[in-house]
Amino acid sequence: MKIFIRDGVSRVVWFSLFGLIVITVTTSNLFAAEDAIDVRQLKMGLDTVWVLLGAFLVFFMQAGFGMVEAGFIRAKNTCNILTKNFLDFCMASLGFFLIGYGLMFGDGNGFCGVKGWCLFGLESTTNGIPLYAFWLFQAAFCGAAATIVAGGMAERMKFPAYLIYSFIISALIYPIVGHWIWGGGWLSKMGFADFAGSTVVHTVGGCAALIGTSVLKPREGKYGIDGKPNVLAGHNIPLASLGVFILWFGWFGFNAGSTLGVTDGSVIGRVAINTNLAAALGGIAAMATVWKRFGKPDLSMAMNGALAGLVAITAPCAFVEPWAALVIGTIAGYVVVRGVELIDKLQIDDPVGAFPVHGICGILGTLCVGIFGKSELGLANNGFIYGGNPMQLGIQIVGSVSTVFFVVVSMGLVFKLIDLTVGLRVSREEELRGLDIGEHGMEAYSGFQIFSTS
């Protein structure tokens, strides 16, 4: 009897211990699963905040573009250029929502996406980011590409024509190039690399500006009978200086925000330092170049040099070491000065240097990926300076040439069609009087008499 009781108690004890172990293990697994879910949700939340912060900074760059362009043109056209900067972001948001995002990131083929109009039928997350947050970030980039053109075509383009242009580039042209590179298109499959948009944003915007200003022809009085350019000085250099600082600040969101997450702080840090160094050396190099060539350290060229450095580092910022960013910025600062001289010799009237800054230096930055990039930093192949392998440089050349060709042909067609329908250019009388009064019936500096000889 005692033996039976003792055996019974032993069984009860063992069963109790076994049950306790099962409950403990099961509970631990449940808590572990909940912890894993919490970690995933926390990561998504942090990444979303980071991407939205980047989107807000890139949106604020619209103010920078507006201040730069307003400062670099004459007072009588200030309201006009600011209205264009304001409305092109409105048109970009609409076009990118209705059509552009689907073309860029929707499922499709190597050329473009074929679904996702108005964001319908798309996954709720993209790259681990909620769809709406990712859309806002990409829409801010789209708006930046569209607004580049305003400066190149300033002081003589009709406002309705500009609205039509800004919708078309945002809904069709920019998204198609974006699909090739960021949306899984044919260049992406080749291994083409453009981390934050030297090609997608700046080459597209800069080349569109070149074609637009070529179709528009120069402003009245810009070139003399002998073909030499006359100075049509900007009316407010302090305003332009403020704009450059705003753009420099916003560019940290432009480049660092393109990491799309905060998991790897070393990448964010490298992108940020490279962005800053390239801008600084671009400003120094441009100032030194213009000082040597013309005898004066011109502030406007120094500012364009800083912007040139920022444009050039945008593609390679995650793939190069800081020393390479110094080199890239220096080259960009020199190139932008010579680019301005070149388009003046060709009698292409670009009031703010949109093509030299964004077009030429966008191409330069794209090629620099294939020269200075390192495979250990996330690139498909080492750049040319590491062992002389031309593979990545060749891919970058193909991508850049293809983008330039597509934008030149498509935007040339767009501007010609606009010119044949609503017209591109204001009348001579309106241009001489100023677009503020002629187009908008208002003045930027009401109460001040503005005199103009051209």
Image (cartoon, rainbow, N blue to C red):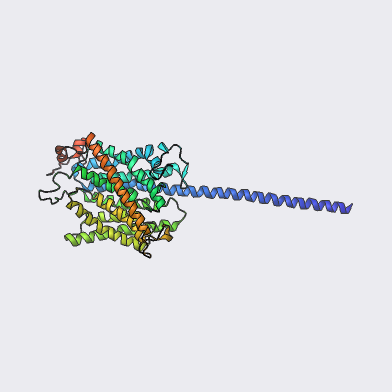
| One can see residue 381 in this view | yes
Q: Is residue 302 above or below residue 184?
A: below
Image quarter of residue 173: top left
Percent of width and height locating residue 312: 31, 55
Which residue occupies 29% across, 44% down? 147
Which residue occupies 41% across, 51% down? 189
Q: Is residue 154 above or below residue 21?
A: above
Side of 277 where 72 appears, left or right: left
Percent of width and height locating residue 170: 33, 41
Side of 453 where 251 appears, left or right: right
Which residue occupies 24% across, 47% down? 210
Image quarter of residue 380: bottom left
| One can see residue 153 in this view | no
The C terminus: image quadrant:
top left
Residue furthest top in the image: 421
Q: Is residue 285 above or below residue 199?
A: below
Percent of width and height locating residue 191: 40, 54
Residue furthest right in the image: 1
Percent of width and height locating residue 192: 38, 53
Foreground residue among 452 and 388: 388
Which residue occupies 13% across, 52% down? 228
Residue furthest bottom in the image: 387
Foreground residue among 243 and 29: 29
Foreground residue among 186 and 154: 186
Report the number of discs. 0
Foreground residue among 312 and 240: 312
